[in-house]
Amino acid sequence: MRGTSVDTAIDLYVPTSIGAIEWGLIADSARRITRSSAPATGTSASHRILAITQLLLWAHRLGLPTDVEELFTPEVIERYVATGCPNLSPASRGTRRSVLRTIGRRVTRRARWDSAAPAYPTARPYQPYTTRECEWLVECAHSQATAGRQRVMTVLLGLGLGAGLAPDEIAHLTARRIITVTPGRHAVALEQRIVPIRTAYAPLIVDLAAQLPADTPLIRDKAVPRIETLWSLLQPCEVPVPLQPLTVTRLRTTWAHDALNSPIPLPHVVGAYGLRSATFIEPLMPALLASIDPETVVANSALYEF
């Protein structure tokens, strides 16, 4: 958490994805290795102890040595990333490996870290969805095989296409955060900002929120322990090939593309998007420029009068 000291982040960390017995077997090692890696902030400590805990748990279950000099080697970490975290997206696995390699350099003496890690798939920008593709996605959400999958996909679409929320914002959003601004207009009340929900997608979220207890997460009744869980929740959903890959980032990108193609002032778009700069526009520039008709630019009277 922001503002938390390094020691507090380490001492109070308790994983939610493993049982108390297994955690008891590796807790001391996880905390000791995290401190040895010298994290600079509480946030960094939280990220590191999570990665260390998962690596130790994987090694413990396989009966592998957990001594730092034997566990934190390039070869073992590559094996763990390839086989030990299947629920992570390719980009998240790359991040996990980077964190563990950073820790390894700080806590080991014998391991060879001078060679670069092999290239690993990273997130790349995808084309935003068209209006028709968005309609198709909503149809797919309603036709999922189970109620749980319908809920997951509906919430992702409603908050991604409807409000442009980031993965961490969606993962922990509860029903009480959906508010009515005026009759027929709804918004998401986050800690730092309030984001209007596009009218076309509001019913996907508002109807669900009205049925849930105020403190229940929208995505599922049980709390989501970490952002990566969104990836595993989305994987069973059936998505037609032309609409793949379906990711929260792509939904958020579509929201930004549509907002930038509207008459909304740019500062309002940036404010709703939740950034203090407009750097998110750069990956969208090819799609934005492709939608511009030179004749409409010349005919736009506003360009002559500002």
Image: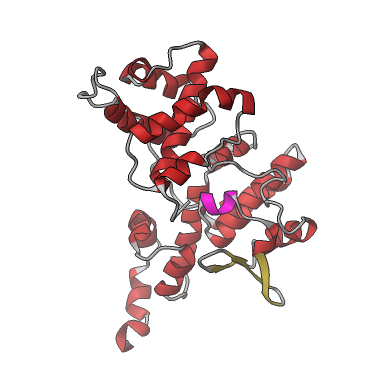
Residue 47 is left or right of residue 227, and the answer is left
Q: Position of residue 271 (x, y in %)?
A: 45, 69
Where is 259 relative to 127, above or below?
below
Where is 243 relative to 192, above or below?
above
Q: Quadrant of residue 112?
A: top left
Main SS of residues in magenta: helix
Residue 244 is left or right of residue 144, and the answer is left
The quadrant of the picture occupied by the C terminus is bottom left
- Please say which color scheme the image uses: secondary structure
Span highlighted in magenta in the image:
167-171
Q: Position of residue 49 (x, y in %)?
A: 45, 35
Residue at 62% across, 38% down: 233
Foreground pick, 295 / 129: 129
Q: Is residue 119 visible?
A: no
Residue at 31% across, 33% down: 102
The single residue placed furthest to the right in the displayed view is 211
Where is 248 relative to 241, above or below?
below
Q: In the image, is residue 170 part of the stretch drawn in magenta?
A: yes
Q: Is residue 85 visible?
A: yes
Residue at 54% across, 15% down: 61
Foreground pick, 80 / 236: 80
Foreground pick, 205 / 239: 205
Q: Position of residue 275 (x, y in %)?
A: 41, 63
Number of residue marks: 0
Q: In the image, is residue 177 part of the stretch drawn in magenta?
A: no
Residue 174 is left or right of residue 32, and the answer is right
Residue at 57% across, 27% down: 23
